[in-house]
Image (spheres, grey):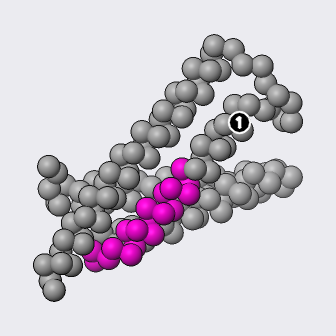
């Protein structure tokens, strides 16, 4: 069994990496939208990146204060974001600029690899979040 300290450390590392990565992504989207004003995907990417930054901060604060509602809010966000990400991967692999793509072996393997990576990251982060929530609720039960 993994200790509470290890879950906290993994949670801190994840929240910091997610916040930094999302901040970089938000900056990249701002630059892209400044260069190509017709690119609407940059504005959507910017909003998604800012959402990740906000929820990463919520996670960090939730770990620091053992606030279960913050941890659960991040878990709900993780479910929604992963679902949207998987839908994006499926759409990106099945159509290119409105035309349906003919699948070949290379595309199938790429698709399966992308789905496997997304679900693996989701599973790991969910495991960490569930561990943090379990220890936070145990601490609340002991305080009562």
* Residue at image location 65% in from the left, 20% down from the top: 107
Q: Quadrant of residue 50?
A: bottom right
Magenta region, mostly helix, strand or loop? Answer: helix
Relative placement, left or right, of 33 versus 98 is left
Q: Quadrant of the C terminus?
A: bottom left
- Label 1 Cα crowd, 10 Å radius (few <14 / some 14-19 / many 20+): few
Magenta stretch encompasses residue 81 = yes
Camera-side residue: 52 or 35?
52
Q: Is residue 64 above or below residue 25?
A: below
Residue 26: percent from left, percent from top:
61, 58
* Residue at image location 24% in from the left, 72% down from the top: 137
The magenta segment: 65-82
Residue behind mark 1: 92
Magenta stretch encompasses residue 48 = no
Residue 61, can we see it?
no
Residue 73: percent from left, percent from top:
45, 69
Q: Secondary structure at mark 1?
A: helix
């Amino acid at each position: 069994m993994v200790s509470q300290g290890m879950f906290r450390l993994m949670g801190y590392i994840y929240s910091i990496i997610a916040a930094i990565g999302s901040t970089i992504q938000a900056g990249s989207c701002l630059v892209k939208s400044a260069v190509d004003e017709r690119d609407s995907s940059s504005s959507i990417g910017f909003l998604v990146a800012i959402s990740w930054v906000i929820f990463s901060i919520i996670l960090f604060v939730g770990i620091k204060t053992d606030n279960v509602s913050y941890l659960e809010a991040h878990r709900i966000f993780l479910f929604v974001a992963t679902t949207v990400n998987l839908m994006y991967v499926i759409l990106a692999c099945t159509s290119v600029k409105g035309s349906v793509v003919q699948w070949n072996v290379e595309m199938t393997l790429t698709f399966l690899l992308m789905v496997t990576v997304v679900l693996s990251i989701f599973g790991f982060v969910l495991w960490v979040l569930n561990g943090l929530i379990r220890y936070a609720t145990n601490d609340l039960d002991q305080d009562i």
